[in-house]
Image (cartoon, coloured by chain):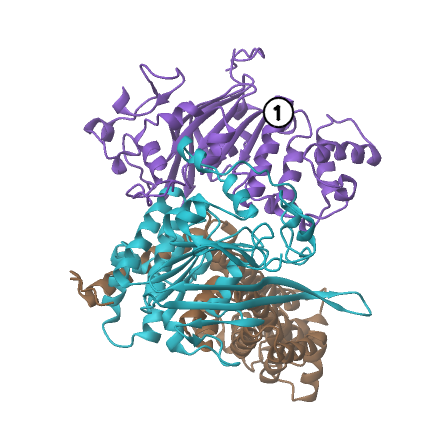
Amino acid sequence: MTTDILTVTDLKKYFVIGHSGIIKREPITVKAIDGINFAIREGETFGLVGESGSGKSTVAYTTIGMYRPTEGGINFRGQSLFEGQKARPLALKKEIQIVFQDPGSSLNPRRTIKQILELPLQIHRRNGNRLEQIVQLLEMVELPPDYMQKYPQMLGGGEKQMVAIARALATDPSFIILDEPTSALDVSIQAKIINLLIQLQNEFHLSYLFITHDLSLMRNVASRVAIMYLGKICEVAEAAEFFRNPYHPYTRMLLSSIPVVSEEEEKLKPQKIISTGEIPSPVNVPTGCSFHLRCPEKMDVCSEVDPVMVEVEGGHTVRCHLYGQPDQ
Amino acid sequence: MNIPFDSAQGRSPLLEIKDLHVHFDVYGGTLKVLDGVNFIVHSGEKVGLVGETGCGKTTTMKSILRILPMPPTRIPRGEIYFKGQDVLKMKEGELRQVRSEGISMIFQDPTAALNPVFTIGQQVGSVVKYSMEGRKLSRKEIRERAIIPLKEVALPDPERMLDSYPIQLSGGMRQRVCIAMALVASRELLIADEPGTSLDVTIEDQILRLLHRLVEEKNVSVIHITHTLGVVRETTDRVYVMYAGNMVEVADTEELFANPLHPYTHGLMAAVPRLTGGGVSDGIPGRIPDYLDPPPGCRFHPRCPHAMDICRQEKPRFYGKRSGVSDNHEVACFLYR
Amino acid sequence: MTAQTKSPTTSTGLSASLARSKTRENLGRNWYKFSRNPMSIVGLITVSLVVFVAVFAPLVAPHPKHASAFVDFANASSPPCRTYPFGTDVVGRDILSRIFFGFRFSLVMGVVVLALVVPPGVTLGLIAGYNQGTWLDTVIMRITDIFLAVPPLVLALAICSVLTPNLFNAMIAVSLMWWPWYTRLVYGLASTLRNEFFVNSAEAIGASKAHIIFREILPNCISPIFTKMSLDMGWVILIGSSLSFVGLGVQPPKPGLGTMVADGAKYLPDQWWISVFPALAIVVIVLGFNLLGDGLRDMFAAEEV
């Protein structure tokens, strides 16, 4: 019986980006996350998929503490991550770490690799020979010890990302958020890093929140997948089920657009749904179901009522008027 | 030297790069980036160029348009023939004509390619102005001509678009504007450098379809540069695979995906995560070579599982496949000599 | 996380060899970038010469005693010649020697003002930038704005005329109106850097605010700060000379460059050398620092691969 390591409950994060009008001054709000619920089990890789504006990165940034929720909460092993107005205690910071998308900007260009890896050790692991610990961390990500003296600009994109992973591991965490860790990298380097992450997960019993827009990659790393659109989750399922049997029209649209490299895979894709129109911005969220403007299966009710999440099969939930909404 | 060019399709290539070497002078020595690149595009053809970061694909494309800063760049050897004329030896006037009427380029990041302080109308308008061969047009005429390409790329409300600033547009719309600008004058060759990389997958799909449609309609040749194999499979007739400053394999698209020959191509294909599941492959061991001191012989040999002695000593040429699906499959690998 | 590994290198051996190769390579790379533009080298040589001459003035000046109270009416107002390469002034003092000593005042002015101004200015900018959007930011930047609103020379003149006119008070005056420029500069940099992912990473790890401000953000501001400091040397010297020229800085008979220009102004155009050479000296020192500043900016520029 596995327990949940992270639970997200009715999470909302709104940003006020300005005001409109001269007299009334209505605030312009971006509803980056607009009420989501999910739980991540100990030891699993939970995948979060979405396009730009979906809010997936905001989920990452809120979980790591860069933002405070507007409403709702996130619990780590039962403990709230946002206790009152206080800053997050160091003991919790130790447990939850993050690897950002852009390796170029997540490593300080004016600090050496040694200094970058030393920081978490200084704060969380006071004892022990610092230099040896750093060499150990570099070995964990298969980088040679003499990389310590280098600056990030001297490293390739993949290597920088490996340093970022080593830094995340330095605090001995239980949970790592991976925000598009390989999106900026070439496919051969991506393969190496993904394998490294899987290996590390097994060795150190880590749980991952894996965020990406690359569905083919998600198919191979996640045990469960959730798909987001304009701040809300549309569908959640076990990975194989998610890809074999997508319910939500948006999921089908996304799956049908994936570029694949073989005929085999081509056959697995749902029938082609050509997306028309632009991705709406989270400032002007349509009424009712936020996807209805682009949905090929739109019904009248879709523009008026926002659907709720229902379970269609064991462990597979969808939020769509097509599937068993209550009181219909 | 001029190669006689015959516009009849297939007689002579539209673009031919021969043995191009490009070097950069930096602190510590010279980066020998391009090491004898050979590349051909015919009229009306869609050619893909696949390669990972640092392989030199953007350098190659920038050399065609000669937009690399000349020191520290040096071109010690090679020729680039566009319609039979060597671009590298052209004077300013001829070069400008090539850039304004012959070849155009769209870049990876449409946000960076558009000037944020000018309206779309001003930017498309300036392309219109330069493509008019010195004929003076009134502002109204330029505006009218500017709307046409905006309509062709299916931008909503082109009239209003003319007065909008790039920041008001989404990423997909900006890329469409770039495509519109690239197709204003009747061009013969469009170089698209990773046109969909910074866009979401559904929008990238839209943009690639649009590009596909336009090039069919206008009979424009396209060089589609990308590091994503899956994209190339759907949008091109022929594909080049590039590694560390050399073309290592070229074939008709279908043939390449059915039958990859070069060890590097194999490694790339294997590294792509599959929708069928089954985990991710190990990738390709090693890293790209240091251009200051590249490995002798075949530049891929330090990472190649099939490296032989000769690979360390000599550079392989393109070898055609003896028998197989198509005649257009060539590999730069001693395994196939 | 108790994976045991056998590390073949000793800690001390490793860090020592790392330190050696890093410094040598960095020096070489920095010189390469600095020297791309020959004018930067001209600037470096000029500044080096000025500093050398100022430091060793008593040894290199042909007539060191002329720098203080000294009269020699026999040779007063002589035009440039062998013994007095830049001529003499109305009381017979060698202008060249006085210029050498004058460099001392200029350099001291520049160094002291910058030493007074840079640490507080930069620190305030960092704090305001890191706390952008909070009341702390508002308070700091509004105070900065108030100081910036007053025209610099006017403020300096006002302060100097209230206090006793001498070099020390001139430095105080200039410092008081100079610090806001650094706060402004660093504020702009820090408020952008504050949102970089490496700062967010440090926060996620649990670094203290002090660490983030001084160890993560500040190192990324160093290049614009140093460049500005080099250019400012020229400006501060110029302002100092202007103050001396109007009688509020270095007082006669001390050989401040501005003072010398003022002294000789009445004798233009006949005894032109008394004003012109000190004025040229000011030009040389300011130009030298400007060119050096350009070179530093190139040196700090990020490399393009």
The brown-coloured chain is labelled C
Residue C11 at x, y = what percent? 20, 67
| Residue at the far front in the pictured view | A327
Mark 1 Cα shell of 10 Å, populated few (<14), some (14-19), many (≥20): some
Q: Residue at x 62, y 75 (%)?
A: C180
Q: Which residue is mark 1?
A: B102
- Mark yes or no: residue C166 visible: yes
- Mark yes or no: residue C232 visible: no
Residue B268 at x, y = what percent? 36, 36
Quadrant where the N terminus of chain A lies? bottom left
Seen from the viewer's position, the closer of residues B237 and B274 is B274
**What tint does the image give chain A?**
cyan
The answer to whether B191 appears left or right of A143 in the picture is: right
**What tint does the image give chain B?**
purple
Question: Which amino acid, mark 1?
Answer: Gly
| Residue A161 in the image: above or below residue C279 | above
Residue B228 at x, y = what percent? 45, 38
Report the label total: 1
| Residue A172 in the image: above or below residue B175 | below
